[in-house]
Amino acid sequence: MKRRTPAHTKRLLARNLRRLRQQRAWSQHDLADEANVRQALVSALEVAKANPTLESLDKIAVALNVGVADLLLP
């Protein structure tokens, strides 16, 4: 497997998170409420500016009904 940079991983997360959220027709606020995280975190993740904790990633994955790995895969 080709080695990825942290910036590349952040961009993958941003793209996947936005796509999964929009598939559900949720706003960032809706996702934040469902995942019990701050809307500012959802926003920062979607523009690849935040480093989420594993706990936050897990909460978001559960809210979206996907695995954590699905948020990070190309």
Image: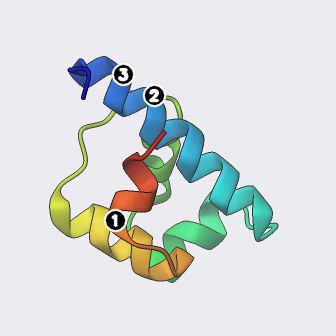
Q: Amino acid at mark 3?
A: His
Indicate the position of residue 55 as horizontal and vertical percent values: 19, 69
Position of residue 49 relative to residue 26, above or below, is: above
Label number found at residue 68: 1
Between the residue at mark 3 and the residue at mark 2, the CA separation in whole angstroms equals: 5 Å
Disc 3, disc 2: CB below 8 Å? yes
Residue that mark 3 sits on? 8
Name which residue lies at 42% across and 46% down.
73
Q: How is the image coloured?
A: rainbow
* SS class, disc 2: helix
Q: Amino acid at mark 1?
A: Val
Residue 60's image quarter?
bottom left
Indicate the position of residue 2 as horizontal and vertical percent values: 26, 21
Name which residue lies at 51% across and 68% down.
32
Label number found at residue 11: 2
In depth, the one of 6 and 39 nearer the eye is: 6
